[in-house]
Image (cartoon, rainbow, N blue to C red):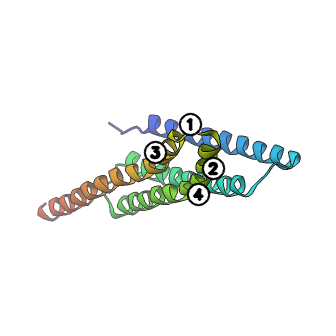
Amino acid sequence: MKIKTTLLKLVTAGIDAFLLLFAFMLTMGLTSSVHEHSLFFLQITTSIALYATCLVVFVISFYLFRIFHLIDQRNFFTQTALHFVRVVRYLFITASITLMGTLPFVYYNADKGDAPGLIFIALAFVLVPLAIAAFISVMEKILINSIKFKQENELTI
């Protein structure tokens, strides 16, 4: 029985397609702001932060596809997979850091529009990648133990 990761690949590709659409919409919004001469510093920093986050998520998707390939080959409990999992964890931390660049713009809009709850919603979006990184850290420890167990079993045979 071969392990199939088709659903995981489709979900990852769907997230990538959504991010491409998001980046396109962000580009269109920036272009219209430039044409209307209504672009200001916080919009530029927020846009840079969002583009950087999109780039980080695309790199995460690349490593996820490599992990899915290892799973399909039944070769997941190896040092290579452990390296990929570590890279994905660090990339999620990087995504959280790049998303922090949106907080000044959110604060400006919350102050201007008298909506203090908007700051908490933005903080939730910034902290979600950190929560995923914490979960991946736990999975990394489980993977380390599994690799050790597999190596011990190979030595006893």
Q: Which quarter of the rendered picture does the N terminus lie within?
A: top left
For the residues labelled 4 and 1, the Cα–Cα distance comes to: 25 Å
* Of 141 and 123, the residue lying toward us: 123
Q: Are marks 2 and 1 in contact (CB under 8 Å)?
A: no
Residue on which the image places disc 3? 124
Residue positioned 37% across, 58% down in the render = 81
Of labels 3 and 1, earlier in sequence is: 1
Which image quarter holds the C terminus?
bottom left
Q: Earlier in the sequence, mark 4 or mark 1?
A: 1
- Residue at 49 percent across and 50 percent down: it is 126
Q: Are marks 4 and 2 in contact (CB under 8 Å)?
A: no
Q: Residues within 10 Å of mark 4 (few under 14, many from 20)?
A: many
Assess disc 1: are there few (<14), some (14-19) or many (≥20) residues with their C-alpha within 10 Å of its C-alpha.
few
Q: Earlier in the sequence, mark 2 or mark 1?
A: 1
* Distance (Cα) linking label 3 and label 1: 22 Å
Q: Residue at x 26, y 58 (%)?
A: 141
Q: Give the mark nearest the N terminus, 4 or 2.
A: 4
Q: Is residue 69 visible?
A: no
- How far across and down, in percent of the image, does residue 117 sit? 50, 39
Q: Residue at x 45, y 38 (%)?
A: 8
Q: Is residue 77 left or right of residue 73?
A: left
Q: Earlier in the sequence, mark 2 or mark 3?
A: 2
Residue type indicated by callout 4: Gly
Give, as a three-letter code, the residue at label 2: Tyr
Q: Which mark is residue 108?
A: 2
Reading the image, the residue beneath label 4 is: 101
**Identity of the amino acid at label 3?**
Ala
